Amino acid sequence: MNKKIALVDLLQASILFTAEQKLLILDQLPMFNEKQVDALGSFLAMEQQFIETHNDEIVANMKKMYAELHVQESPDAVYVGSGKPN
């Protein structure tokens, strides 16, 4: 049972599955056999390891994309109806 609890934690942290997919897996989890739990656990553990190993690259690319999205913004711009302060 401890493997299933660990699997739930890994599944919650996953970025590859949508919320709907996660719920479907959680609904079916009690019926998983040990081989299925091990396989999904290994996959999710590899996902977490990849994220941890490449964290600096991921963050750098996210910052770069964010900067490129906001190139045209002016600091004095007024955003009407966008929820941003003017």
Image (cartoon, rainbow, N blue to C red):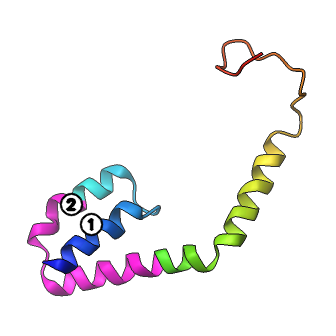
**Which residue sits at x=35%, y=84%?**
42
- Region rendered in magenta: 25-47
Q: Position of residue 66 (x, y in %)?
A: 76, 48
What amino acid is at disc 2? Leu
C-beta proximity under 8 Å, tags 2 and 1: yes
Count of picture labels: 2
**Which residue sits at x=74%, y=62%?**
61
Q: Residues within 10 Å of mark 2 (few under 14, many from 20)?
A: some
Query: Would residue 77 appear left or right of 19 to someone viewing this image?
Result: right
Q: Which residue is mark 1?
A: 8
Q: Residue 26 has which mark?
A: 2
Q: Position of residue 31 (x, y in %)?
A: 9, 71
Q: Mostly what secondary structure, the magenta segment?
A: helix
Residue 30: which quarter of the image? bottom left
What amino acid is at disc 1? Val
Q: Position of residue 50 (x, y in %)?
A: 55, 78
Identify the residue at the far top of this view.
80
**Which residue sits at x=16%, y=67%?**
29
**Which residue sits at x=21%, y=80%?**
3
